[in-house]
């Protein structure tokens, strides 16, 4: 277990947002990552840009319209040149990591120790072979409860989360399940590609501590608003009920 306040003190930069369990920096993550001591982070949980050039979009659906980052040209080349080196940097300071790399350039990321899937039935964006309804989850290191419990590595989400002003937030319920399974009470979580703050909100609800880094101020603002409205959840046992993708493992009825 690591002391969030002492790491934040060592970083020495003014946070964009801070409460007793969360610190958010509005910065290029490279600057902050180099100031965090090696192995001081229990878990990196992160969802960087995918190199999809704003995505395919689907006409008429507000949340799936094409969007581009202000600060970053979201091409596969830039993921390889800019994003993957930053993820490697984050891997160097953590005990274990969970990454959603997208499918386009996932083979350029460091080799994971395990792979699962995130199935999003309600997704609207398209790829060359149809709906973009699942994507890989890469796991680095090992389950902190290995030998005590057996975890599913794949998750499904049947709903969209509320539109929060960010174009592609990850489902909070899935993020809570990931954190609950692969972090321990009081652990320090890092998300260097925070977006609208889903990792930090999930961490706060589950009694974990979190450092988030996001380069675009408008997304930091959404994250800060979500965090100021979040409290530790009394419904933790609910999130523990992990259904995995068991229904898909049943044989088809003839
Ligand atoms: C796919 S989004 C993350 C979405 C997040 N999981 C959520 O639920 O809201 C990736 C984020 O990484 C941010 N980003 C890209 N390059 C960055 C950098 N060098 N430092 C910090 N953040 C960066 C982008 O601005 C974007 O908000």
Image (cartoon, rainbow, N blue to C red):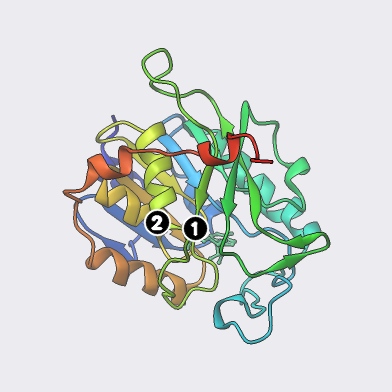
Alpha carbon of mark 2 to alpha carbon of mark 1: how far?
A: 12 Å
Q: Quadrant of residue 71?
A: bottom right
Labelled pair 2, 1 in contact (Cβ < 8 Å)? no
Q: Quadrant of residue 168?
A: bottom right
Is 135 situated left or right of 180 in this image? right
Residue tagged 2: 172
Say which residue appears at 44% left-offset and 29% top-offset: 39
73 relative to 118, above or below = below
State ligand 1's quadrant.
bottom right
Q: What is the x, y in percent for residue 87? A: 60, 44
Q: Is residue 159 visible?
A: yes
Q: Quadrant of residue 163?
A: bottom left
User: What label does residue 158 carry, if any?
Assistant: 1
243 or 210, which lies in front? 243
Is 233 situated left or right of 13 in this image? left
33 or 172, which lies in front? 172
Q: What is the x, y in percent for residue 149? A: 38, 20
Say which residue appears at 42% left-offset and 49% top-offset: 175
User: What label does residue 210 carry, if any?
Assistant: none
Q: Which quarter of the image is occupied by the N terminus?
A: top left
Q: Nearer the viewer, mark 2 or mark 1?
A: 1
Q: Residue furthest left?
A: 234
Alpha-carbon neighbours of circle 2 within 10 Å: few (<14), some, or many (≥20)? some
Mark 2 or mark 1, earlier in chain: 1
Q: Residue furthest top?
A: 147
Say which residue appears at 31% left-offset and 44% top-offset: 239
Q: Secondary structure at mark 1?
A: loop
Q: Secondary structure at mark 2?
A: helix
Q: Which quarter of the image is occupied by the C terminus?
A: top right
């Amino acid at each position: 277990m690591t002391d969030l306040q002492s790491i934040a003190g060592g970083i020495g930069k003014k946070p964009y947002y801070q409460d007793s369990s969360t610190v958010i920096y509005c910065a290029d993550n490279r600057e902050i990552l180099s100031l965090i001591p090696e192995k001081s982070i229990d878990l990196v949980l992160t969802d960087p840009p995918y190199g999809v050039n704003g995505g395919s979009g689907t006409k008429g659906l507000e949340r799936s319209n094409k969007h581009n980052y202000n600060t970053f040209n979201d091409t596969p080349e830039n993921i390889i040149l800019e994003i993957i080196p930053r993820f490697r940097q984050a891997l160097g300071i953590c005990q274990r990591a969970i990454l959603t790399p997208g499918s386009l350039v996932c083979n350029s990321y460091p080799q994971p120790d395990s792979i699962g899937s995130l199935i999003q039935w309600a997704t609207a964006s398209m790829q060359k072979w149809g709906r973009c309804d699942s994507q890989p989850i890469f796991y680095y290191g090992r389950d902190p409860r290995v030998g005590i419990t057996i975890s599913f590595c794949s998750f499904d989400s049947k709903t969209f989360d509320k539109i929060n002003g960010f174009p592609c937030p990850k489902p909070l319920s899935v993020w809570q399940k990931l954190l609950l399974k692969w972090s321990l009470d009081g652990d320090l979580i890092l998300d260097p590609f925070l977006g609208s703050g889903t990792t930090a909100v999930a961490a706060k609800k589950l009694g974990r501590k979190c450092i988030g880094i996001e380069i675009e101020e408008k997304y930091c603002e959404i994250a800060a608003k979500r965090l100021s409205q979040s409290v530790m959840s009394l419904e933790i046992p609910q999130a523990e009920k992990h259904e995995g993708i068991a229904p898909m493992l049943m044989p088809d009825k003839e």
